[in-house]
């Protein structure tokens, strides 16, 4: 029974790891079943070995728990495809909550052993407290299952408020530091009545404050996500408006050219009677230049047509060859906004890469069509110069330090619809294929 106490104290790493994995199930580098098969026995073995070592040396579990937690965090980060900011912040948040529970268990242990001086000398919690400690950790993980697998998971998968992750990690770090600072230098200090009562109050207050701030952050992140989503919709509407204005201008030019066609034919007939070939050539050249060069129509879906038309106009303005094969009906089996976000992200990246490519090599090709009744297939190819920076399957941005947001956003949109995205690059040709499911 004595040996079981340090082992169980270290064993709280397991529910902590489980809780941390709830919101990132879709971002695992390997299937969850395969991960559990090797990670659960590994953690159990490490906890048992650490507990035996603490028991043999009659030492507290705190140093061993710190090392084991650090190892678990490293394993956790390495098994995920998401950025270090996200995985590290989630790990710190779980550690902060469990640190509060650990402080609460310390206070509970002092309350149970207040009248037992011999038991107070043990470096570990008493068995009843250890069992309560474990029960609270597992209960918290069970209670947190639904919010972490729904609200938090959506927050993790969405790239719209990535900057929020750059600052939130400070909050759990502060709570971890506070709980470490609260550990009394001398164990006897806690057995004083008023000190123990105050310690209880502070532990419970810290736990509820931590949960409160986490809830506030979640609500704030959801609000930011909603606002960014609205901004994206407004941007798509703006693209469609610009596309509409371009179409109106082109249609007006075409109408004017058709109206003048009869007079132009009469003028050509007169020049032909005169036999003036040079004037005929000049007149035809002038007439051809008045015909609008903008492609009027790409597909039946207005939203996709507007986005593609917008980037087509930008490409032509920069003299970048732009080839489009778009076959999308007016009603799509997939989310229309998601489709437009994929198109805009891929075309923006292709346009950006083309601007840094030698003019003679510039080329963008877009293909999008439906397969069956529920799949939308999109492919964007473009040439590029320079080096593609990739780390653990994540492409790094060429415009700033850190991960590239565009391709990550495309991948998350595809995975959200149970689809897939693949990226290949070789010999100066970058190709992205995306499958969206309805």
Image: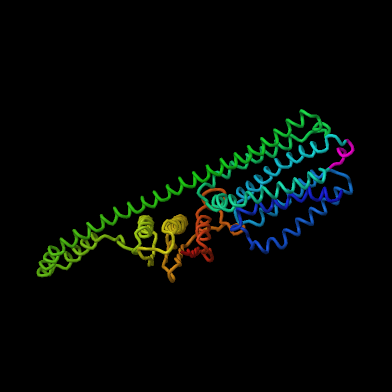
Residue 37 shows up from this direction: yes
Q: How far across and how far down the image is residue 397, in percent?
A: 54, 52
Indicate left or right for 428 with 298 as reference: right
Residue 178 in the image: above or below residue 287: above
Q: How far across and how far down the image is residue 155, in percent?
A: 55, 50
Magenta stretch: give its range. 117-123
Residue 54 in the image: above or below residue 329: above
Q: How far across and how far down the image is residue 108, in percent?
A: 76, 39
Q: How far across and how far down the image is residue 219, in percent?
A: 53, 43
Q: Going 75% across and 45% down the picture, which residue do you hit?
A: 133
Q: Going 80% across and 47% down the picture, which residue do you hit?
A: 64
Indicate left or right for 106 with 268 as reference: right
In this orientation, which residue lies closer to the viewer: 334 or 402? 334
Residue 354 shows up from this direction: no
In this orientation, which residue lies closer to the viewer: 175 or 71? 175
Report the residue that reaches farthest toward the top. 194
Q: Going 41% across and 58% down the picture, which residue do you hit?
A: 336
Indicate left or right for 257 with 417 as reference: left
| Residue 109 quadrant | top right
Whether residue 17 appears in magenta in the rendering, the answer is: no
Indicate left or right for 189 with 218 as reference: right
């Amino acid at each position: 029974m004595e040996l079981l106490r340090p082992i169980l104290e270290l064993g709280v790493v397991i529910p902590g790891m489980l809780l941390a994995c709830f919101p990132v199930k879709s971002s695992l580098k390997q299937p969850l079943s395969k991960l559990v098969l090797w990670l659960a026995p590994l953690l159990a073995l490490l906890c048992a070995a650490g507990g035996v070592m603490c028991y043999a040396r009659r030492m507290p579990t705190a140093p061993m728990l710190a090392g084991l937690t650090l190892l678990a965090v490293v394993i956790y980060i390495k098994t995920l495809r998401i950025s270090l900011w996200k995985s590290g912040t989630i790990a710190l948040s779980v550690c902060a909550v469990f640190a509060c529970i650990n402080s609460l268990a310390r206070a509970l242990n002092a309350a149970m052993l207040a009248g037992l001086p011999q038991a107070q000398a043990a470096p570990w919690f008493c068995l009843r407290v250890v069992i309560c400690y474990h029960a609270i950790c597992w209960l918290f993980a069970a209670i947190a299952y639904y919010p972490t697998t729904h609200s938090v998971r959506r927050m993790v998968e969405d790239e719209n408020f990535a900057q929020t992750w750059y600052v939130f990690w400070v909050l759990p770090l502060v709570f971890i530091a506070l709980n470490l600072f609260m550990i009394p230098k001398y164990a006897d200090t806690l057995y004083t009545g008023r000190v123990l009562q105050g310690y209880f109050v502070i532990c419970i207050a810290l736990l509820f404050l931590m949960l409160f701030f986490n809830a506030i952050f979640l609500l704030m992140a959801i609000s930011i996500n909603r606002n960014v989503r609205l901004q994206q919709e407004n941007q798509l509407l703006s693209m469609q408006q610009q596309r509409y204005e371009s179409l109106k201008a082109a249609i007006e030019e075409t109408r004017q050219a058709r109206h003048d066609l009869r007079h132009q034919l009469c003028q050509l007939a007169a020049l032909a009677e005169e036999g003036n070939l040079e004037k005929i050539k000049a007149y035809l050249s002038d007439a051809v230049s008045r015909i609008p060069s903008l492609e009027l129509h790409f597909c039946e879906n207005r939203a996709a047509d507007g986005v593609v038309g917008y980037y087509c106009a930008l490409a032509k303005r920069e003299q970048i060859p732009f080839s489009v094969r778009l076959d999308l009906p007016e009603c799509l089996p997939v989310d229309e906004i998601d489709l437009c976000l994929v198109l805009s992200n891929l075309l923006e990246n292709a346009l950006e890469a083309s601007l840094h490519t030698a003019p003679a090599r510039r080329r963008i090709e877009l293909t999008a069509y439906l397969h069956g009744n529920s799949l939308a297939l999109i492919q964007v190819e473009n040439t590029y110069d320079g080096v593609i920076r990739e780390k653990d399957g994540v492409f790094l941005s060429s415009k700033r330090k850190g991960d590239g947001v565009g391709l990550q956003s495309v991948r998350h949109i595809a995975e959200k619809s149970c689809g897939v995205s693949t990226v290949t690059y070789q010999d100066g040709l970058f190709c992205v294929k995306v499958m969206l499911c309805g």
